[in-house]
């Protein structure tokens, strides 16, 4: 259940509600928005109905709402408004402006990373992607540069000012990746790695949770709930395509997930048309479609020389193709009333 505290209630009055709830054996999760304060009640006890009735009669309580959904804190009812993820340097994901995260699938070396970072920044990307720890379907393919890759990403951030997003696969690596990255990515294959979810819940950096290859929206939001309930409220969702019977594309981009997720949760959502299609020439149209559907941003694979990429070259854009994609996004961004963050910053 969720308790909405009245505007103007004092901190002591709010604390009194928290104390009452915890005294009856429940956990709490307090979310403070610009206008409302919401207390999520965690746990299952037989006295829930009695507690709800008692709370509803308190003068500082506006409303007590049962949450029928299996995911609670990440549900729309669980927060006073849209969650905005704020990074150092003024990047805000989930606000009016839309963000493009771009870079190679994998950090392959210093020069290619610095070159790509400079280019994507010039074209209007506002975050830099690159995998240092790579989930590989085959044990024989490249597994990533590990710590050295993280250092290269940090150098690219230093040069360009772009915040960095990179994947963490192993709970043991969370402290290390957290030290270098601005956003930690949980890959599709690890969406239900519950130990990893619990570990990143303790991290002090935002998490981007990719949808699992065959995960339903409910399973995906429950995975987000693990991170949120574990104490990390900075969760971004990423629709990256799901497995269907169709094999002409690498995955099937579930675009309807974007407006549906917006209805169901307060968390921001990013679309990944690169992994969703697996074909470089489908990336730009599906990126436009993602923005049109209401995504808060995009994550795009870009490589200086896709035909020689160690991973995912077939879905990676050349520098020129990325520049063209960014141009093509502008009219869509205007049409939905959400400027590209780089353009918004230029205007400000
Ligand atoms: C990636 O972003 O490089 C990646 C491996 O994505 P996913 O987990 O969606 O397959
Ligand atoms: Mn990739």
Image (cartoon, rainbow, N blue to C red):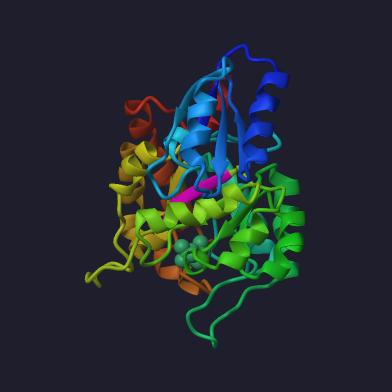
Q: Is residue 287 above or below residue 179?
A: above
Is residue 301 among what the camera can see?
no
- Residue 311 drawn in magenta: no
Quarter residue 248 falls in: bottom left
Look at the image and give the residue range highlighted in magenta.
235-239
* Most foreground residue, 269 or 321: 269
Q: Is residue 169 left or right of residue 327?
A: right
* Most foreground residue, 40 or 244: 40
Residue projecting furthest to the top: 8
Seen at 22% across and 71% down, the residue is 245
Q: Is residue 226 above or below residue 149?
A: above
Is residue 224 among what the camera can see?
yes
Q: How many marks?
A: 0
**At which x and y percent is residue 302?**
50, 57
**At which x and y percent is residue 88?**
71, 37
Q: Is residue 172 above or below residue 44?
A: below
**At which x and y percent is residue 133?**
63, 70
* Most foreground residue, 328 or 51: 51
Seen at 54% across and 43% down, the residue is 125
Report the predominant secondary structure element of the magenta stretch.
Answer: strand
Residue projecting furthest to the bottom: 140
* Quadrant showing the C terminus: top right
**At which x and y percent is residue 288?**
33, 43
Seen at 46% across and 37% down, the residue is 49
């Amino acid at each position: 259940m969720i308790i909405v505290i009245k505007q103007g209630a004092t901190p002591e009055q709010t604390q009194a509600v928290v104390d009452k709830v915890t005294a009856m054996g429940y956990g709490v999760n307090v979310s403070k928005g610009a206008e409302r304060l919401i207390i999520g009640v965690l746990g299952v006890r037989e006295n829930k109905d009695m507690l709800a009735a008692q709370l509803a009669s308190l003068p500082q309580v506006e409303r007590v709402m049962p949450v029928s959904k299996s995911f609670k804190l990440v549900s729309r009812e669980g927060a006073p408004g849209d969650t905005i993820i704020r990074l150092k340097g003024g990047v805000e994901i989930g606000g009016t402006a839309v963000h493009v995260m771009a870079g190679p699938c994998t950090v392959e070396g210093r020069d290619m990373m610095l070159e790509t970072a400079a280019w994507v920044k010039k074209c209007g990307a506002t975050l830099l992607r690159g995998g240092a720890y790579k989930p590989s379907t085959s044990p024989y393919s490249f597994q990533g540069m590990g710590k050295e890759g993280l250092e290269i990403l940090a150098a690219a951030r230093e040069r360009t000012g772009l915040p960095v997003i990179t994947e963490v696969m192993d709970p043991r690596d969370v402290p290390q990746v957290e030290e270098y990255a601005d956003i930690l990515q949980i890959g599709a294959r690890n969406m239900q790695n519950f130990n990893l979810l619990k570990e990143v819940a303790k991290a002090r950096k935002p998490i981007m949770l990719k949808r699992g290859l065959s995960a339903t929206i409910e399973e995906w939001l429950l995975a987000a709930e693990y991170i949120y309930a574990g104490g990390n409220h900075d969760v971004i969702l990423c629709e990256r395509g799901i497995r269907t019977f169709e094999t002409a594309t690498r995955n099937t981009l579930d675009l309807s997930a974007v407006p549906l997720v917006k209805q169901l949760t307060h968390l921001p959502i990013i679309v990944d048309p690169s992994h969703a299609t697996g074909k470089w020439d489908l990336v730009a149209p599906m990126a436009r479609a993602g923005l049109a559907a209401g995504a808060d941003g995009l994550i795009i694979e870009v490589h200086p020389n896709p035909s020689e990429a160690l991973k995912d070259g077939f879905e990676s854009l050349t520098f020129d193709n990325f520049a063209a994609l960014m141009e093509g996004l502008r009219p869509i961004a205007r049409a939905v009333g959400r400027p590209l963050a780089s353009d918004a910053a230029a205007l400000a």
